[in-house]
Image (tube, helix red, strand yellow):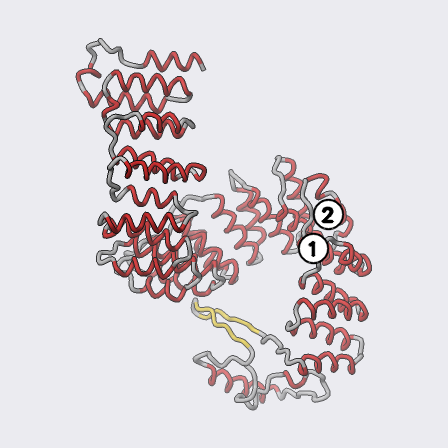
Amino acid sequence: MVRASCKLVHALPKPNSNNSYHKSGVHLQDTFLGLLKSCSNENHIYQTHGFMIHHGLDQDNFILSQFFHTCSALGFVNYAYSILTSNPNPNIDLHNTLISIFSRQQHLSNDAICLYKQARAIGLYPDTYSIPFVLNAAVTCLITSRQIHCQAILTGLSNDVHVATSVVRMYSSFGCISDARKVFDEMRNKDVGLWNAMIVGYVKAHDMDTAKYLFDNMPEKNVVSWTTVIAGYAQGNQFSQAIGVFRKMMSVEGGAKPDEVTMLAALSACAHLGEHELGEWIHSYIIKHRLRRTVSLNNTLIDMYAKSGNVKKAVELFESMETRSLVTWSTVISALAVNGYGREALNMFSRMEMVGIRPNAVTLIAVLSACSHAGLVEEGRLYFKTMEEKHGISPDIRHYGCMVDLLGRAGYLDEAANMVKMMPFEANAAIWGSLLAAARNQGHVELGEQALQHLTEVEPHNSGNYSLVSNTYAALGRWSEARIARKIMRDTRIKKLPGGSFIKVKDTVNYFYSGDRSHSQCERMYRVLSLLNRESKTVLHEDYWGYEELLDVDNPQEGHL
């Protein structure tokens, strides 16, 4: 530390020397900025400040601003603040610099607001930089933020597009979307940043219809505009719409080019829709255009390949990554697990432990899921038992759910039922559903009835629960009980959720649901179904207890699609 300080002192130009640094203010400034980059401790800060004063550089606002940033980076913000308060001729620019520094650190947000108020108290007027900086600090207090907005109006700054953008973001962050929209509508000259801020506000408010309306009416769109809408649809589980906007973005000639964040949102939608062809095209585009391969982007690619069933590609991508996060390991373990590679998933988990990555609760859900899918009961019991003592993670209801599923699949129904009774949580619908499904598969009607009784309390309107019990009775030939289960559904007016399917034709995904007649080709499809029915001479057996729910293709007006 002392040696480093000595080097910095020797690097400083001597006050009385006649070298070029004293003949040229530009060279002196460049030298000083170079010294700032070499600062690494408190002594360096003091020495550099002394040099700055000795050569009159403390009167240069740009130099002072750079010095403040260096103080902040090294953790000496208080020293920068003391310099500002001792300055005999303070100005708004220096205050803005320190307000900006304070606003980026959450624990100093109140100091940023106080500094703003001090500037006002000594007669300094805020400018178009002051308002956005201080609003960024006031993210936890709506009252303070409104006061700052009022001051912007009184000083005539609210007409500045950058100030308006920060105000729109502020109101949106507090959920005051109508206030944000009022500020947006009152601005005559809107730039793309203001449009984007308003669209982001609607996305945060889960109002994608209005967000899309604004997006469609933007005079100019950039990559942020497109990405905001794509990500908004993806986060709202409207994956088909997200893909549609992405395809449109790529089809606009000379339009905005996607970046890493755009691809991240699009890939997420691909993974959920099973659009593996588009996902692979996106991967090729990323490689061809040399987009930055962030860890998050690689993680999403792994997830996309896993959900499309291409486990080999997912693992290859994992192995090619130079940097892996805990999410990366958890994703590839889950990818192997859900695709039936239970042993491989556990081996991957062992590799993760060997390289020193500590698992979290999500990782262990993937591990227990691997055991469940592969029927590795003993391994599952061991991982569950050692969760807390080895990894310091207390099992939550999701881990218990995995164990109930594992034991139920393997036929250990009594142990699974006992675990449900002994766990320190109230069983949720997923756990009772797992137990009910296991009871059905094993023909354990009594346990199935118990699970159904609890399920009707947790999910009284879920038709799938009654269907499982009905099917259990039917599998045992107990048709009267099966009919009773169906009768209960009808008497309590529980509607069976319609079956659904989808098919991709010419890059468009078409969805179909039982009873839904909204598709534009609906009538034509019914005619084809009727023709197929007549050709196959399908016979419907009326003694089947579920006959009334089958498709009546000869009477499409009353049937279900």
Q: Can residue 373 be seen in this view?
A: no
| Marks 2 & 1, CB-CB < 8 Å contact | yes
| Residue 438, numbered label | none
User: What amino acid is found at the position of numbered circle 1 in the picture?
Assistant: Cys
User: What amino acid is found at the position of numbered circle 2 in the picture?
Assistant: Phe
The residue drawn where x is 43% and y is 47% is 140
How far is disc 2 from disc 1 in space, using C-alphas? 10 Å
Q: Which of marks 2 and 1 is nearer the N terminus?
A: 2
In this image, 47 relative to 490: left or right?
Answer: left
Q: Quadrant of residue 389?
A: top right
- The foreground one among 472 and 283 is 472
In this image, 407 relative to 393: left or right?
Answer: right
Quarter of the image that includes the N terminus: top left
In this image, 419 relative to 39: left or right?
Answer: right
Q: On the image, numbered disc 1 is attached to which residue?
A: 402
Q: Can residue 559 be seen in this view?
A: yes
The residue drawn where x is 28% and y is 42% is 129
The residue drawn where x is 78% and y is 81% is 479
Residue at the far left in the pictured view: 23
Residue at the far front in the pictured view: 121
Label 1 element class: helix
The residue drawn where x is 26% and y is 41% is 126
User: Residue 301 at what x, y percent from top left?
Assistant: 50, 51
Above or below residue 498? Residue 21 is above
Above or below residue 182? Residue 326 is above
- The foreground one among 82 and 468 is 82
